[in-house]
Amino acid sequence: MPDKATAAFIKRNCANYDKDGKCLLDLTESGRLCPFMHDVPYRCKYGRESVLPADPDLSLKYEASIGQAATAGKACADCGEPFEPKSNRQERCSSCGAHHRRKKKRGYNREYQLRKYRNN
C-alpha cells in the first residue's frame, strides 16, 4: 500500500481510477483493484509510466518503496531528473547546478556594476 501522498496523487491524476478504487483499464464487469490503492501482486504500467512522472519526488519515493530504483536520490529542482546528491542540501544535478551558479554570478556582477556606476 502506498503512502498517503502517492495515493492522493493517483486519485487526482489517474484517468483510469474509478471512485470505487478499481482500474478502468480492466474491461471485465468486476474490474480489478487499483494497484496503487490496494496491496495486489501486479503493478500498473500506466500509472508508473504516465501518472507518477508528473511529480518526480513521488515517483522516486514509489520506485524506492517497491525496490526498483537504482538510487533513492533526489529529483533535480530544475530539470526534474533523478540524481544522487553529494550533500543533504544539494537541490540540483551537476549540470543544472553549474548553470544556476553562472546565472546567479551574472546577477551579482550586474548589481555590482550598477552600484559602481551610480557612485561615480
Image (spheres, grey):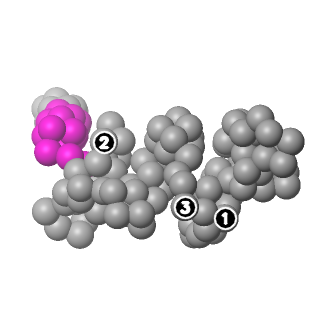
Q: Is residue 115 above or below residue 10?
A: above
Q: Nearer the viewer, residue 38 or 32?
A: 32
Q: Tell me if residue 52 can be seen.
A: no
Q: Nearer the viewer, residue 29 or 106?
A: 29
What residue did someone put label 2 on? 81
The quarter in which the N terminus is drawn is bottom right
Q: Which residues are magenta?
A: 92-108
Dividing the picture into quadrants, the one containing residue 57 is bottom left
- Mark earlier in primary sequence (3, 2): 3
Q: Is residue 2 above or below residue 27?
A: below
What residue did someone put label 1 on? 38
Dividing the picture into quadrants, the one containing residue 103 is top left
Q: Tell me if residue 31 can be seen.
A: yes
Q: Nearer the viewer, residue 93 or 36?
A: 36
Q: Secondary structure at mark 1?
A: loop
What residue did someone put label 3 on? 41
**Mark 2 vs mark 1, CA separation in Å:** 28 Å
Residue 92 relative to residue 52: left or right:
left
Q: Secondary structure at mark 3?
A: loop
Image point 72% across, 45% down: which residue?
Answer: 23
Whether residue 93 is in magenta: the answer is yes
The picture places residue 85, in percent across and down from the top left corner, at 19, 60
- Mark earlier in primary sequence (2, 1): 1
Number of on-image labels: 3
Q: Amino acid at mark 1?
A: His
- Front disc: 2 or 1: 1
The picture places residue 10, in percent across and down from the top left corner, at 65, 50
Q: Amino acid at mark 2?
A: Glu
The picture places residue 90, in percent across and down from the top left corner, at 23, 59
Q: Label for residue 58?
A: none
C-beta proximity under 8 Å, tags 2 and 1? no
